[in-house]
Amino acid sequence: MDRRKAKAFGERMEATLNAGALALMTSIGHRTGLFDSMAGMKPSTSHEIADTSGLDERYVREWLGAMVAGDVVEYKPDGRTYRLPDEHAASLTRDAAPGNAAVYLQYIPLLGSVEDQIVECFKSGGGVPYAAFPRFQDVMAEDSGQTVIPALLDHILELVPGLTDSLKQGIDVLDVGCGSGRALNIMAMEYPASRFTGFDLSDEATSAGRRQAKANGVTNLVFEARDVTKLGTPKQYDLITAFDAIHDQAEPASVLGGIADALRDDGVFLMQDIAASSELHENLDNPAGTFLYAISVMHCMTVSLASGGAGLGTMWGEEMARSMLADAGMSRVEVSLLRHDSQNAYYIARK
């Protein structure tokens, strides 16, 4: 045995333990608004930070201990004051979007909440149903708020030549797996001549989208909670979108086939999905590779298997995506990357 290698690996595991704990504490800092409160504050005591945040001082003080030990927050023993450096706030506050890393760190405790059920799946097979992830829609909405929403009008839609002009003139648009419909609400407001529809299995998500549409005063947008494996809408749409929604479907081949059928002959399918290869060895230099395979085990793969589905997983990859799109009848496929979103690829597919 190489003892130096063993020692180095042991130190790496210790660092991983600390990093995992820091991820959990960072998620709490985001959810409680502590990072937002501390941004721009002068060095302050735990009581001052708690008062500003409207939180319990004892919990805030212990949380600050973790943040100081993790080199996130600076500490001055003389006055027992804490400060969040501007350089760190630039990656941790809501004002830092789309670069707010704390949004993504929420996935760590979220996925950890189903660990016992996942362990049982390792023993007996099957999966953990979507309903076991009560906060997933909220976190995904924040995630989308950083990758899709800020870039939707100026970058994502512009990937399809002539699409924005068509939207201005008026076309029929469907978003498959629309979640709470943030993207649809933006498009419906921006392009009042077009007609928008959102399908999602979650009644809670579509209800949220409907409420937002009402608040926005848009009348060209409808939401429906339905199984997207059975669209049953032949040649009805000019544009169909799916943002990070295909790989965790129970029957992704059926969904893609339904999308192809639902497109008009000159229609376009715009799909955002994980930028990865279908081959493990091609993903080893992906800086988020470990996380992406982990989220596959803990969510994307398991929710599909829970429904007796294919269990494609997060890392199904471009090769498989192209093959499945072709099998569905969409043989003309282009793949683009956007500078703001290193984690995702954008597929433009036509019949």
Image (cartoon, rainbow, N blue to C red):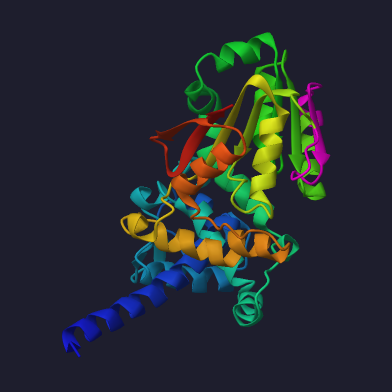
- Quadrant of res 200: top right
Establish if 297 lies above or below 321.
below
Which residue is located at x 17 percent, y 87 percent?
A: 2
Camera-side residue of 91 and 137 = 137
Establish if 167 lies above or below 276.
above
Would residue 321 appear left or right of 91 to someone viewing this image?
Answer: right
Camera-side residue of 45 and 283 = 283
**Is residue 27 at all visible to an observer of this figure?**
no
Would residue 224 appear left or right of 321 to someone viewing this image?
Answer: right
x, y (%) of residue 75?
36, 66
Would residue 209 appear left or right of 276 to someone viewing this image?
Answer: right
Camera-side residue of 83 and 271 = 271
- Quadrant of res 129: bottom right
Which span of residues is magenta-colored? 214-232
Q: Is residue 128 magenta?
A: no
Would residue 116 appear left or right of 295 to someone viewing this image?
Answer: right
x, y (%) of residue 25?
50, 67
Establish if 14 lies above or below 347.
below
x, y (%) of residue 142?
59, 46
Q: In which quadrant of the rendered image does the C terminus lie? A: top right
**Is residue 343 at all visible to an observer of this figure?**
yes
x, y (%) of residue 131?
75, 62
For the view shown, which residue lies furthest in the top direction?
169
